[in-house]
């Protein structure tokens, strides 16, 4: 098998560099017993004080708060405008003929508009949209706004009907309100993002990061940030832990080496550091806890790259059992019942629409297949689905009837002689896959997810390829993140798994729609 992509999924435009687990040590029982001897070693080299650090900063928390206040005020204004627009469309256009219509004045609906606008902003705040770290993450915010508006629309309608608020609210108005508010919010947020990405404001809002130690995960994060001119994080440099081995590396991708761990307190002040990320720590436990205590005193975020967890890092969850903190992989986005319900609803609607639109396409290409190679039009094949459960996938036959005679299952290759002439065209444009809308409707597949593989081809992969079976925690999809990045067919499976796992860790409805859209234009290795 050949490799067709050498870059990591973390370098893609949808990657989120904030996906590292925050340590609870700074406020936990371990950090409360720092070693005084080691703590003094961390501060002996540079006589900096917390007061000096705060006084030396060019940006203060109030800077971020002003922009957050602007975001809140803007969202509230947009919510009110959306309510007005929805009222006009519902009661003053042809839409008034839908459902039960009762002529109402805007004054009568004013209470609904005010309550709806304020409650929407509260929902968005609960979703984490109004945080300084979110201001420079437009894709993440867009996804949260979409989820928040859907939740608010359903919740607001339920609340007004349950408490019988007067006048009775129109269901059509509520749905229109959600659509109008979401559209206007996205336009407003795009303008705000453009405003915040001006160089002067960008430098103020970015969080300045100092690495302690270095590792492949840190190098990947550094590359991601370096390739994103609008990243929310800016790396100022790195320090070397006390017992770190000297590897003599001249890696140009490393940030500036600023000194040793003993100089870290002075560096926090001098470089106005907002966040310390421990990439690899060779020190002893007391030195580690002293560093976390130092960050706590200096109001610096303290985070750790969890190198011992190689997959599903975003699912790391800290829980307390009998007073003892325990960190482990606990949940992924699609483990949430709400996210699962949203994705399943999207699959049902999408598969129904897909089957209707695909019917003439299936009829046309089915006839072409039959004319070129008399025999069955549809091809049923066993595939492995969620939790390893097998199911039959449906495709329009794109190969000769005896394609696997004597050789058994094998990967399709470029210029594969087994393909029909019409089959080569169908496979290039994924037309042979359209009957899988039926698998999606049945719940065996999803519109987007890791592609399902044949059991006989992958039976040994769980032993040979790290984390292979982890991809079976999600439903297989008609298209996927790996596929639009050219990883399909006879390509590097290990690389494909990285993309599948990244998708599962970073799932969002917004990401699903982007993948579906890009499927129409990304056809690398489609043969």
Image: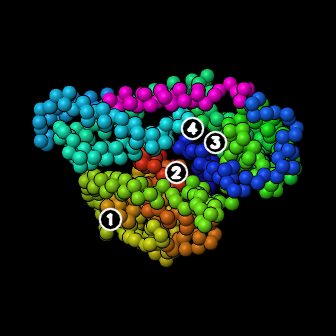
- In space, the residues marked 4 and 3 are separated at their CA atoms by 17 Å
Q: Looking at the image, tell me whether mark 1 or mark 4 is earlier in sequence order.
A: 4
Q: Which is nearer the eye, 133 or 324? A: 324
- Taking the magenta stretch, the answer to whether it contains residue 41 is no
Asked if disc 4 and disc 3 are in contact, CB closer than 8 Å, the reply is no
Secondary structure category for the residue under label 4: helix
What's the CA distance linking mark 3 and mark 1? 39 Å
Q: Quadrant of residue 185?
A: top left
Q: Helix, strand or loop at disc 1? A: helix
**Left or right: residue 219 compared with residue 138:** right
Crowding at mark 4 (Cα within 10 Å: few <14, some 14-19, many 20+)? some
Magenta highlight range: 54-80
96 and 412: which one is in front? 96
Spatial CA span between label 2 and label 3? 15 Å
Foreground: disc 2 or disc 3: 2
Residue at the spot of label 2: 506
Mark 4 or 2: the one toward you: 4
Residue 501 location, x and y as percent? 55, 57
Label 1 or label 4, whichever lies nearer to me, is 4
Res 238 seen here: yes
- Write down the residue under mark 3: 224
Q: Nearer the viewer, residue 337 or 230?
A: 337
N-terminal of the pair, mark 1 or mark 2, is: 1
The crowd level at tag 3 (other Cα within 10 Å; few <14, some 14-19, many 20+) is: many
- Which residue matches tag 1? 442
* Disc 4 target residue: 133
How packed is label 1: few (under 14 Cα within 10 Å), some, or many (20 or more)?
few
């Amino acid at each position: 098998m050949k490799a067709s992509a050498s870059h990591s999924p973390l370098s893609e435009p949808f990657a989120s560099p904030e996906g590292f687990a925050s340590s609870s040590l700074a406020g936990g029982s371990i950090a409360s017993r720092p070693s005084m001897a080691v703590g003094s070693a961390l501060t002996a080299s540079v006589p900096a004080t917390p007061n000096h650090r705060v006084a030396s900063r060019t940006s203060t928390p109030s800077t971020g708060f002003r922009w957050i206040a602007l975001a809140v005020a803007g969202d509230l204004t947009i919510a009110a405008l959306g309510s007005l627009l929805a009222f006009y469309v519902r009661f003053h256009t042809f839409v008034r003929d839908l459902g039960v219509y009762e002529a109402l004045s805007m004054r009568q609906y004013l209470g609904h508009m005010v309550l709806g606008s304020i409650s929407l902003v509260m929902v968005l705040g609960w979703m984490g949209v109004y945080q300084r770290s979110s201001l420079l993450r437009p894709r993440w915010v867009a996804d949260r706004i979409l989820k928040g508006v859907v939740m608010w629309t359903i919740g607001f309608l339920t609340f007004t009907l349950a408490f019988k608020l007067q006048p009775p609210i129109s269901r059509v108005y509520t749905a229109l309100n959600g659509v109008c508010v979401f559209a206007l919010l996205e336009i407003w947020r795009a303008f705000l993002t453009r405003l915040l990405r001006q160089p002067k404001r960008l430098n103020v809002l970015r969080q300045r990061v100092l690495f302690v130690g270095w590792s492949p995960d840190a190098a990947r994060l550094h590359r991601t940030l370096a390739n994103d001119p609008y990243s929310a994080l800016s790396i100022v440099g790195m320090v070397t832990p006390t017992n770190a081995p000297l590897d003599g590396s001249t890696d140009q991708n490393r940030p500036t080496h600023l000194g040793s761990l003993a100089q870290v307190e002075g560096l926090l002040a001098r470089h106005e550091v907002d966040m310390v990320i421990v990439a690899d720590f060779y020190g002893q436990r007391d030195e580690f806890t002293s560093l976390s205590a130092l960050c706590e005193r200096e109001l610096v975020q303290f985070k750790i790259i969890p190198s011992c967890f190689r997959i599903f890092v975003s699912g790391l969850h800290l829980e307390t059992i009998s007073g003892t903190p325990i960190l482990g992989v606990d949940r992924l986005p699609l483990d949430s019942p709400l996210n699962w319900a949203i994705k399943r609803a999207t699959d049902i609607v999408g598969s129904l629409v897909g089957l209707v639109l695909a019917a003439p396409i299936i009829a046309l290409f089915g006839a072409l297949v039959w004319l070129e190679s008399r025999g069955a039009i549809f091809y049923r094949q066993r595939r492995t689905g969620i939790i390893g459960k097998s199911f039959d996938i449906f495709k329009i036959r794109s190969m000769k009837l005896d394609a696997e005679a004597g050789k058994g299952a094998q990967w399709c290759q470029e210029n594969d002689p087994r393909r029909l002439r019409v089959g080569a065209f169908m496979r290039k444009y994924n037309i042979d896959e359209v009957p899988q809308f039926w698998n999606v409707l049945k719940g065996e597949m999803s519109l987007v997810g890791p592609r399902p593989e044949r059991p006989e081809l992958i039976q040994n992969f769980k032993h040979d390829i790290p984390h292979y079976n982890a991809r079976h925690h999600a439903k297989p999809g008609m298209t996927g993140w790996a596929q639009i990045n050219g990883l399909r067919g006879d390509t590097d499976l290990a690389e494909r798994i990285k993309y599948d796992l990244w998708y599962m860790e970073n799932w969002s409805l917004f990401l699903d729609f982007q993948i579906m859209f890009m499927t129409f234009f990304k056809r690398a290795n489609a043969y």
